Amino acid sequence: MMTNLYGNRHVRLVALHGLTMILLGLAVFYVRNTMTNIFFDFIGGLLAFLLIAASLIFLALSDWLIVFDLGVGEVSKLRRLLTLSTLAAAGSLSMMFYPAASTRILCYFVAVYALVLGIGKLYLAAHWVGSQATQIFMWILAAIALSFAGVLVGAAGLTEWLAVTILAIYCLFTGLQMLLCMFFLLRMSGSIEVSTDRTMPRTKHA
């Protein structure tokens, strides 16, 4: 069941992703503000590249540490998230050692990441068992997440300043939507638990 996957044991995992992406977005925005000429555009693009790549590697390492702390049995339950974060980290590490790495390549890489996350959000929205209003909101988040894949591909052909701006906006959106999804899932899980408690027969005490 969907709520079992995102129980209280996994709150810190998704919360870590959300908070990291928000902080990353703010950091990239700060870098963007320093890009005032051609030289600083180059430096800013390089810093944004390193920040995003290092953050994805950090998230993958944190995911595995947290999952092993929860127990080896949790690996199978979170295999999709672990696979995505591991592949993202591997790709980030490869780009860091790729001589021709640039903001353009980073945009393409993050576009693929956004596409996979967007597909995951579509799956989550399609299998939502909460209120209809929340499900519609989940569909909207999924649509925005998917649209970012196209926007990021387009950003690869823009100036460094605009590309870094779009990357920062995407990081902020991803962090916020992760925290929102976590909130809705926990609220739905709590509602199910309360409903179950009310329907359980009470034992009589002598």
Image: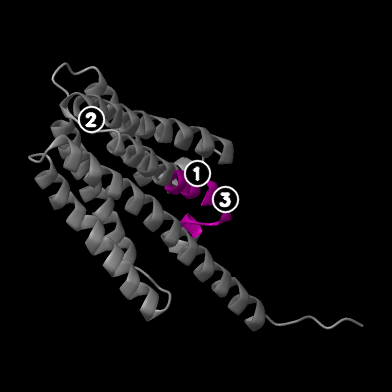
Pair 2/1: label in front = 2
Q: CA distance from mark 2 to mark 1?
A: 38 Å
Please tell me the numbered disc located at residue 9. Answer: 3
For this rendering, which residue is in front, 121 or 76? 121
Indicate the position of residue 71 as horizontal and vertical percent values. Answer: 56, 39
- Which of marks 1 and 2 precedes in the sequence? 2
- Which of marks 1 and 3 precedes in the sequence? 3
Indicate the position of residue 36 as horizontal and vertical percent values. Answer: 23, 33
Residue at the far front in the pictured view: 36
Vertical placement of residue 78 versus 89, above or below: below
| Pointer 3 with pointer 1, Cβ within 8 A | yes
Residue in the image at 46% along x and 59% along y: 182
Q: Which residue is mark 1?
A: 74
Q: Which residue is mark 2?
A: 45
Pair 2/3: label in front = 2
> Is residue 79 something that shows in the picture?
no
* Residue 153 placement, left or right of 57: left
Specify how the rendered protein is coloured: one colour
Q: CA distance from mark 2 to mark 3?
A: 37 Å
Going by the numbered disc 1, the residue's amino acid type is Glu
Going by the numbered disc 3, the residue's amino acid type is Arg
Res 200 quadrant in image:
bottom right
- Which of marks 3 and 2 precedes in the sequence? 3
Within the magenta stretch, is there residue 12? yes
Residue in the image at 49% along x and 62% along y: 183
Q: Secondary structure at mark 1?
A: helix
